Amino acid sequence: MSFTLATWNINSVRLREGLVARLMTEEAPDVLCLQECKSPVDLIPLEQFQALGYHHMVARGQKGYNGVAIFSKMAIEEVAAEDFVSLGHARHIAGKLENGVTVHNFYVPAGGDKPNREINEKFGQKLDYLTEMRDYFRANAPEKSILVGDLNIAPREDDVWDHKKLLKVVSHTTVEVEHLADVQGAGDWVDVTRADIPDGNLYSWWSYRAPDWDTADKGRRLDHIWATPDIANSAHSSRVIRAVRGWEQPSDHAPVFAMFDL
DNA sequence: ATGGTAGGGCGCCTA
């Protein structure tokens, strides 16, 4: 049994309902995980997505900020929704698919501007969020599981457009990369995207603020697909659909895809 | 060191 999974920070699921529908139509992943829906769950335009074959959804939402959702062609049952660091934010939802695979969808806090928890509370919350993720997977060892989302960290030198310039920029600092590695180690997670595409620069996000995003190409790989070792070997055909960043009124993130043969 | 662009929802927070 084979299925395709995608993760995409949509930056408002209601404003970009049409872009979600376009991705569902043109690429048709079996499971689509969204972050930054910026919508209460009951205002997500579920009916249009159901008309495209995505009959199942698990989600957490709030007005204006954050929000995570999993749309699926196969049945999915909610199994967890954690509020790490007790921020009261909708940043995690987990569901078990009818094929037995558990999917964790995360929107990790961005962390503010200054990479110093003494002067920037948000940076401390980001590090603490990652620490609680680590502890969660230590206490709940994942099996047959996939972890996706906007983790707001680009861990490798070739996950950013300029490693040295970004070492002091939130998303690529050493302390963040170490915290993310601890989460990965705690669940024995395999970075599926980089197992599949080991060499070369790879980005999933380009700032709205930088003009001419495509030519300048000042990107970062903030969006990730991980899997536990029992299914990671079955993953293949990973890709970032960069062209989506160039669609009309786009999200600043491009979707990341992987296929699994179970 | 600063400001640059977006979304939500209407003054300003967040990314």
Image: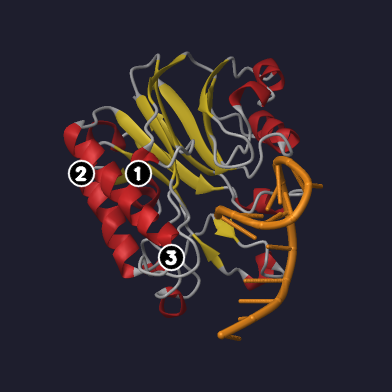
Give the chain letter at badge 2.
Answer: A
Residue under the image location 51 percent in, 37 percent down: A6
A2 relative to A47 in the view: left or right: left
Q: Which residue position holds label 3?
A: A120
> In the displayed structure, would residue A144 be above or below residue A243?
above
A192 relative to A140 in the view: left or right: right
Task: Give the residue type that dot 1 points to.
Answer: Val
Q: Position of residue A23 (x, y in %)?
A: 66, 35
Q: Please say whether residue A88 is visible from this viewpoint.
A: yes
Task: Give the residue type that dot 2 points to.
Answer: Ala
Q: Residues within 10 Å of mark 2 (few under 14, many from 20)?
A: some
Residue under the image location 51 percent in, 59 percent down: A203
Q: Quadrant of the C terminus of chain A?
A: top left
Task: Give the residue type that dot 3 points to.
Answer: Asn
A248 relative to A94 in the view: left or right: right
Q: Position of residue A85 (x, y in %)?
A: 35, 44
Q: Position of residue A79 (x, y in %)?
A: 36, 20
Q: Which residue position holds label 1?
A: A85
- Nearest the viewer among A115 and A156 is A115
- Please report whichever mark, 3 or 2, sits nearer to the chain's N-terminal start: 3
What distance separates the C-alpha of mark 3 from that of mark 2? 27 Å
CB under 8 Å between discs 2 and 1: no
Give the chain letter at badge 3.
Answer: A
Q: In the image, are marks 2 and 1 on the same chain?
A: yes
Residue under the image location 62 percent in, 35 percent down: A63
- Please report whichever mark, 2 or 1, sits nearer to the chain's N-terminal start: 1
Q: Quadrant of the N terminus of chain A?
A: top left
Q: Please say whether residue A154 is visible from this viewpoint.
A: no
Determine which quarter of the picture holds residue A20.
top right
What distance separates the C-alpha of mark 1 from that of mark 3? 16 Å
Q: Which residue position holds label 2?
A: A186
